[in-house]
Image (cartoon, rainbow, N blue to C red):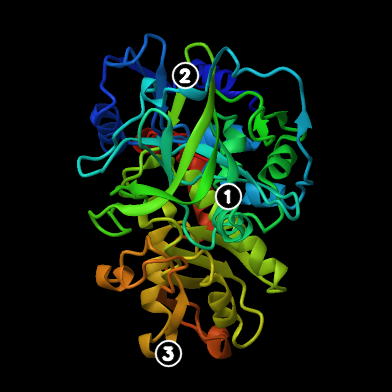
Amino acid sequence: MPGDLRSWLEDVDQHGEMKKISGAHWDLEMSGIYEIVAKELAGPKPVIMFDDIPGCAKGFRTVFGLFGSPRRVAKTLGLPENQIDRMNLLKNWHKKTKEIRPIPPKFVNACNFMDHIEVGEKVDLLKFPTPRFHELDGGRYFGTCHAVIQKDPDSGFVNLGTYRIMLVDHHRLALHILSGQHGSIIMNKNYFARGKKMPVVVALGLDPDLWYTAFTRLSWGESEYDYAGGIRGEPIEVVKGEVTDLPIPAHAEIVLEGECTPDATVDEGPFGEWHGYYGNLGLSPVSEPVIEVKAVYYRHEPIMTCQLPARPSLDTSTLPIALSNSSAIWRRLEANGLPGIKGVWCYSEVAGDGLFIVVSIEQLYPGHSREVGLAASQFPHQGRYTIVVEEDIDPSDIEQVIWAMTTRGQPHEAIQLLHHCRSNSADTTIPLQEKLKYKVAPKPLHNSRVVIDACRPLEWQKDWYPLAGLSSELRAELLRKWSKPLAEILKKQIR
């Protein structure tokens, strides 16, 4: 399991999964290089570390693509590193989530990020190699692979979330949080609605398991610190912030302490988002809360962690997002008492964050498949298409899914359209003019969703047409007899 980012990166380097590039500029070059690698390199993608960045002090570095290989995801989550195909990775993770017991963070006296300290007028955010990711972006984005840390003043619940952050000037940042997310509820309901300033911490260069947890959808009141400790099997070490009193990850690379003031806003964006579009208000900026940074801390030769937001097929670090969403949907279905769930896959790597969901089930009663589809379709907030297949279909194999969808049901019977479902300002299917009607949050935005039942009708499933294909018994026999030539042809070990 990770100890801090640097020890995790040492392991990456030892496995030959890191590439280092010197001299690339923060303005479009770093992100452009990574996008080319992500798009054109087949298979697992390396972590790319950029150093000697023009305009920045020597030793300031950035890294892109932390989770670009299944092995690195498995290592981060403490899963077997020799079982990293998608469904085995999910099944191992889903099994582990049932065994996780929250472990609260541990306060310690020492931390890594106090090598350099800037307070008050000495704060200078412009010294960091903050990237501008896309050519039409309206600014540089300090926070894409990080945690925003807040505390609910009523319950004491500490929330960590990955909410995008734009660099404004030497001491200010713009904070963008979608409505309905925990960070938005804490900020708007429990601070701004009461006319109070909100203390906030931004931490970059986290332990990778803690960053994974920061973008995972947990229940209200379930702290990401506790959950990450449960994943690791020991407490996350934290220190108390001198300005905010918030718990801060002790092994972070870069930490900012500050506050957001009600009614203090600044133009944010535009920004090319996770689904591959400028989805908020197109190319128009949006008024967002300002983080006034009071103190900056960073390690010697700090590492700024970056996540490229782009078309999902280009962003190879979406595997852990797919894993997180798939397991969350699976847990929710089981928690609702729905039996027979055999697998879930949320196609975040090719269709955006949860827009395309497939659930595999063993049909146990009439209406079972439709019931599962309706429940799964309401997670996450932007689910667009949900397909239910039978247990003989691997939900992570899109070819199998399409085969089942096109051969096992009549469209007029299989497709169910749902109206007036929850959405938000990132939804690219809502016309821009509709979003512009509402000037204050929360914006009452809704979308529609489709549930497709790709299961054979239970009433005559036993009388279904015989399947044509290689039996498992004959396959095993052929693999034993012809393992060597097959291995040479397929260029992989035969199992």
Residue pointed to by mark 2: 122
Q: CA distance from mark 2 to mark 1?
A: 35 Å
Q: CA distance from mark 1 to mark 3?
A: 35 Å
| Disc number placed over residue 216 in the picture, else none | 1
Residue at 26 percent across and 43 percent down: it is: 138
| Disc number placed over residue 413 in the picture, else none | 3
Give whichever of discs 1 and 3 has the lower sequence position: 1
**Callout 2: SS:** helix
Count of residue discs = 3
Q: Do the numbered discs 1 and 3 sit on residues whose CB atoms are within 8 Å? A: no
Name the kind of residue labelled 2 in the image: Lys
Q: Do the numbered discs 2 and 1 sit on residues whose CB atoms are within 8 Å? A: no
Asked whether residue 353 appears in the rendered view, the answer is: yes
Q: Quadrant of residue 186?
A: bottom right
Q: Nearer the viewer, mark 1 or mark 3?
A: 1
Asked whether residue 86 appears in the rendered view, the answer is: no
**Above/below status of 60 relative to 38:** above
As drawn, which residue projects farthest toward the top? 58
| Disc number placed over residue 51 in the picture, else none | none
